[in-house]
Amino acid sequence: MNRILSKTQLAEEIYQLKIEAPLIARERQPGQFVIVQLDTDFGERVPLTIADADPEEGSITLVIQTVGKTTHMIVDMEVGDSLNNVVGPLGTPTHIEKVGTVVCVGGGVGVAPLHPIAQALKDAGNKVIIIIGARSHELVIFEKEMKAIADELIVCTDDGSYGRKSLVTAPLEERCKQDPPPDMAVAIGPPIMMKFCAETTRPFKVPTVVSLNTIMIDGTGMCGGCRVTVGGETKFVCVDGPEFDGHLVDFDNMMQRLGAYKPMEDLAHEQCHLEAEIKERTQQ
């Protein structure tokens, strides 16, 4: 049992939970994730990247976007409640070394898992330029945390309501055109965003790491649900990743697989909101 120590709403449909998990907090490394399960017999297993950890407190921080029934159920829990099953740390940690200048690009909720990676790259002695993007000002998260790390921070919004009105690929391309270009790029966010970040850096031969969040069940490489094609070979995100060379990932195939359950996710999402509205009305 993992007790919820704090809960904060960061933006619409995005919540931050700090949970008690001393063994995971002690062992986790940047880039790793956990799998959360509410009902240990039949419940959905949800992979969530560890956004932060405090070994002394014995806690890890998870940032959750509500997209289906289980994620809604998790964020509906209150401080003091406990998650039945939190497994981790899972996945291969980020390879951290001093390479020079690194551009870290985060989109939407992907900014949260980017945070510990950017921090580790900075601690390793790199110059870290951070680009974060969201659809609007209200959906920008982790700006304060990223500002504390970055040598340069660029905020982009699709509608221009905050920061720069552009996609994250625009400032990324500008940095790649500089002489010299960045030594490395890291992109985490929606699959389509990571695909175009990789395509942006490709002509400049800037090594680009992406962190994939695919359909996942067991998290140990046994089920094969998280398989992706990387460089023409089948890889499993849970054990071979979650990070891969963005220039080798078959994003189109990955997005096609991710879309298999989207109609059911959308239906569950709508049902959760409808039930919440009905509950609120009956309590008035």
Image (tube, helix red, strand yellow):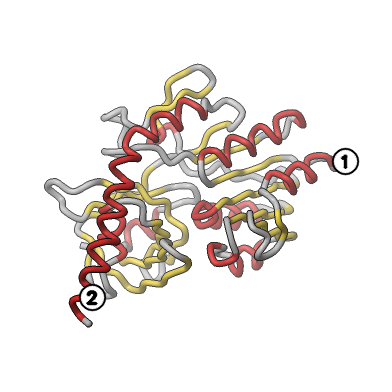
Residue at position x 65%, y 68% from top?
Answer: 148
In-image side of 24 versus 201 (left or right): left
In the picture, residue 241 is in which quadrant?
top left
- Label 1, residues with CA under 10 Å away: few <14, some 14-19, many ≥20: few
In percent of width and height, residue 109 lies at: 49, 55
Left or right, 282 with respect to 48, comes to: left
Q: CA distance from mark 1 to mark 2?
A: 60 Å
Mark 1 residue element: loop
In this figure, which residue is indicated by the disc labeled 1?
A: 179
Quarter location, residue 85: bottom left
Front residue of this view, candidates 114 and 96: 114
Residue under the image location 64 percent in, 34 percent down: 198
Q: Is residue 177 above or below residue 46?
A: above
Q: Quadrant of the C terminus?
A: bottom left
Q: Which mark is residue 209?
A: none
Q: Position of residue 9 (x, y in %)?
A: 42, 70
- Residue hosting label 2: 281
What is the quadrant of the N terminus in the image? bottom left
Frontmost of labels 1 and 2 is: 2
Q: Residue furthest right?
A: 179
Q: Residue at x 39, y 30 (%)?
A: 257
Residue toward you, 41 or 197:
197
- Dot 1 amino acid type: Asp
Q: Residues within 10 Å of mark 2 (few under 14, many from 20)?
A: few
Q: Which sits earlier in the primary sequence, circle 1 or circle 2?
A: 1
**Residue 13: image x %, image y %?**
41, 61
Q: Is residue 271 above or below residue 6?
A: above
Task: Pick whichever, 160 or 206, lies toward us.
Answer: 160
